[in-house]
């Protein structure tokens, strides 16, 4: 096992691992007869902890460990969690979320890192649990502002490199590959990397050792006894840490409301074999998450077994397959993969198309096929479409629309509501209880979930013996603080959402979103008034332009009334003030027309008066 020690000057290299010393796992420093050891500001974690432990006089009171989330609480996505001790800040994950219906025009949502930027000299690195978008997707934006070392497993770093390359900014960042069993010395933290199981290969947990105790950060996980890569989650290491004493468990809550155990990924492979064996005269199209390389591998395995070629649709899936194959995470027999435009060269029963779009995303492969908008694949009645995914909350309507369109075209569709062709990558209730039971945490913090998930997970912890007062339901930005003996939520740090719209990062705020929703709901009316710059007289009748409110050719009477009421508003304003005040004039026009239009139509379009001086 290698331990990698880092200080403010960067990586020092690898050397033989030694058991970390000092006040860990909630233990208190004891009095000792030896002379006091000097505590240097930039000393390594071993020296700092040893110094605290060997004080001759009354031991120095330890600082408090702080933990807070900049995303990933009361929401699915945008995961970013932060540990802070004295002059060291450690960040876990840097993910994005996709916009909801209240964010028209927005492409992506990332965490607000203003607090990290204000304290950039303290940030010792970002450690990544796995390569899903909700855990790595914000890195291209975060690293532009906060260029600190990033640590992840081989596949995770490969996917991060691919993502950074798309943004044209790969070479300037410090990406470090780690593997399960490694230990990282990062500032005041010693991080152990622990193998885990999830719906993407190379997922890990972290045991974060601090001077006040050890925190286990699970990341996304499930307990899979028969994983595709053959390596089960390291429950032995978690049990070993539990015996030594775990200060806090920070755990994935996604499936806390689901009873029982999550099925093994291998069960999907058996279902694929069953589907492929029965569809002997049909073309098969499989939609799944691009990042689930184990799922795609099983599609390829079944295709090879039943003599089919595999074509891939979707840039993200193509990129991930390239990275996974290059790094040895996928085994694809030579000649199995064909280009998408070669599909028509083969009989339908000799082809499988593996595509993105399992969540009904409008621009993804499956949606384009369903809407007759795909440049290569046209859905026919001879197609069997398998949607191997379950809906992410909020995507149900989009998926239903795609499924309906596929049925209209005569295709047979197998989806999660009809058959078990998907298993989750997240632990269900019994697995969550197992992790709590073997780690025996003093404090418990559920993360990665909406509020009901967090509450139900806390209840599971109480069933496993965690006192109710030792479980903490937190919101984004709230600070959990502990000295190893007691803990509380104490204050908050700046947090929120940064909206990505095209090339704009953070330039769309609440006011812009409010205007967009207003325009989407009620439309826009532009009132253009030409006025004499000297006398202030109206030169001609106002021009009215309607967009998204009414069709002007069919609403001539309403448009005429708007003109008349605009002139009335101008006359009233001029009567009240002899001075030319264009600002007051615009306010008067809006006030007159708002009242009239709402009474007439029960709608309140956005009104934009324009004064043109002639």
Image (cartoon, rainbow, N blue to C red):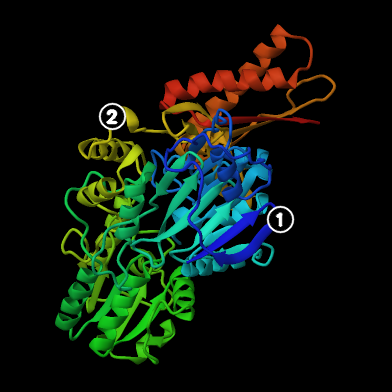
Residue at image position (20%, 67%) is: 414
Position in image of residue 423 (x %, y %): 24, 62
Work out whether mark 2 precedes mark 1 in sequence or the reverse, and give the earlier one: 1
Q: Secondary structure at mark 1?
A: loop
The answer to whether 91 is drawn above or below residue 455 in the figure is: below
In percent of width and height, residue 289 lies at: 36, 65
Q: Position of residue 248 (x, y in %)?
A: 39, 41
**Residue 419 circle label:** none
Name the side, left or right, on which 14 lies relative to 292.
right
Q: Count the marks.
A: 2
Residue 193 appears left or right of 123: left
Q: Is residue 384 above or below residue 513?
A: below
User: In percent of the image, x 18 and y 81: which residue is there?
Assistant: 279
Whether residue 262 is visible: yes
In the displayed structure, 431 sits above or below 112; it is: below
Query: 511 and 230: which one is in front?
Result: 230
Which numbered marker is on residue 9? 1
| Badge 1 density bin: few <14, some 14–19, many ≥20, Cα 10 Å | few
Q: Where does residue 573 sit, x and y in percent of width and height?
A: 68, 13
Residue 468's mark?
2
Q: Which label sits in the foreground, 2 or 1?
A: 1
Q: Toward which corner of the image does residue 359 lie, by quadrant?
A: bottom left
Of all residues, the one furthest to the right in this rendering is 534
Label 2 and label 1: CA atoms lie apart by 43 Å
- Image quadrant holding the C terminus, namely top right
Residue at 36% in and 89% down: 333
- The residue lying toward the viewer, choosing from 405 and 565, is 405
Question: Dot 2: within a 10 Å radius of its alpha carbon, few (fewer than 14), some, or many (20 or more) residues?
Answer: some
Q: Secondary structure at mark 2?
A: helix
């Amino acid at each position: 096992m290698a331990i990698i020690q880092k200080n403010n000057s960067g990586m020092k290299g690898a050397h033989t691992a030694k058991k970390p010393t000092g006040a860990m796992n909630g233990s208190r420093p004891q009095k000792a007869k030896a002379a006091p050891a000097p505590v240097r500001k930039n000393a390594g974690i071993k020296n700092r902890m040893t110094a605290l432990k060997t004080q001759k006089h009354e031991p120095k009171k330890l600082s408090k460990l702080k933990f807070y989330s900049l995303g990933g609480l009361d929401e699915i996505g945008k995961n970013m969690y932060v540990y802070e001790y004295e002059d060291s800040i450690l960040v876990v994950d840097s993910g994005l979320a996709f916009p909801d219906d209240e964010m028209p025009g927005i492409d992506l949502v990332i965490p607000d890192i203003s607090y990290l930027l204000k304290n950039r000299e303290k940030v010792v690195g970002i450690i990544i649990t796995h390569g899903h978008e909700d855990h790595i997707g914000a890195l291209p934006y975060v690293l532009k502002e906060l260029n600190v070392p990033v640590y992840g497993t081989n596949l995770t770093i490969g996917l991060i490199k691919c993502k950074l390359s798309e943004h044209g900014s790969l070479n300037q960042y410090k990406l470090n590959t780690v593997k399960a069993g490694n230990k990282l010395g990062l500032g005041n933290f010693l991080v152990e990397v622990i193998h885990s199981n999830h719906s993407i290969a190379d997922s890990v947990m972290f045991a974060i050792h601090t001077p006040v105790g050890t925190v286990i950060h699970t990341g996304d996980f499930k307990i899979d006894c028969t994983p595709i890569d053959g390596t089960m989650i390291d429950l032995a290491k978690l049990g070993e840490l539990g015996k030594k004493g775990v200060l806090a468990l920070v755990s994935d809550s996604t499936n806390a409301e689901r009873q029982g155990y999550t099925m093994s990924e291998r069960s999907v492979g058996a279902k694929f074999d069953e589907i492929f064996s029965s569809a002997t005269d049909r073309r098969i199209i499989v939609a799944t998450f691009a990042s689930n390389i184990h799922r795609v591998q099983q599609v390829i395995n079944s295709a090879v077994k039943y003599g089919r070629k595999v074509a891939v649709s979707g840039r993200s899936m193509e990129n991930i397959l390239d990275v996974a194959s290059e790094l040895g995470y996928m085994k694809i027999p030579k000649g199995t993969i064909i280009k998408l435009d070669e599909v028509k060269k083969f009989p339908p029963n000799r082809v499988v198309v593996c595509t993105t779009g399992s969540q009904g995303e409008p621009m993804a492969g499956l949606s384009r096929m369903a809407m007759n908008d795909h440049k290569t694949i046209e859905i026919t009645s001879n197609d069997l479409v398998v949607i191997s995914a379950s809906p992410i909350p909020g995507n149900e309507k989009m998926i239903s629309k795609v499924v309906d369109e596929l049925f209209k075209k005569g295709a047979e569709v197998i989806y999660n509501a009809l058959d078990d062709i998907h298993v989750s990558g997240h632990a269900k209730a019994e697995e969550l209880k197992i992790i709590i039971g073997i780690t025996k945490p003093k404090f418990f913090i559920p993360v990665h979930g909406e509020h009901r998930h967090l509450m139900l997970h806390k209840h599971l912890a109480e069933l496993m013996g965690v006192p109710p007062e030792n479980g903490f339901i937190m919101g984004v930005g709230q600070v959990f603080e502990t000295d190893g003996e007691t803990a509380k939520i104490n204050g908050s740090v700046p947090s929120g959402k940064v909206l990505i719209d095209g090339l704009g990062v953070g330039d769309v705020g609440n006011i812009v979103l409010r205007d967009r929703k207003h325009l989407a709901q009620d439309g826009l009316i532009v009132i253009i008034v030409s006025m004499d710059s000297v006398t202030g007289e109206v030169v001609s009748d106002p021009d009215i332009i309607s967009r998204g409110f009414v069709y002007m050719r069919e609403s001539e009477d309403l448009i005429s009334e708007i003109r008349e009421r605009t002139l009335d508003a101008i006359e009233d304003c001029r009567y009240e003030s002899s001075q030319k005040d264009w600002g007051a004039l615009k306010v008067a026009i809006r006030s007159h027309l708002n009242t009239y239009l709402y009474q007439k139509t029960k709608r309140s379009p956005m009104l934009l008066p324009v004064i043109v001086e002639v």
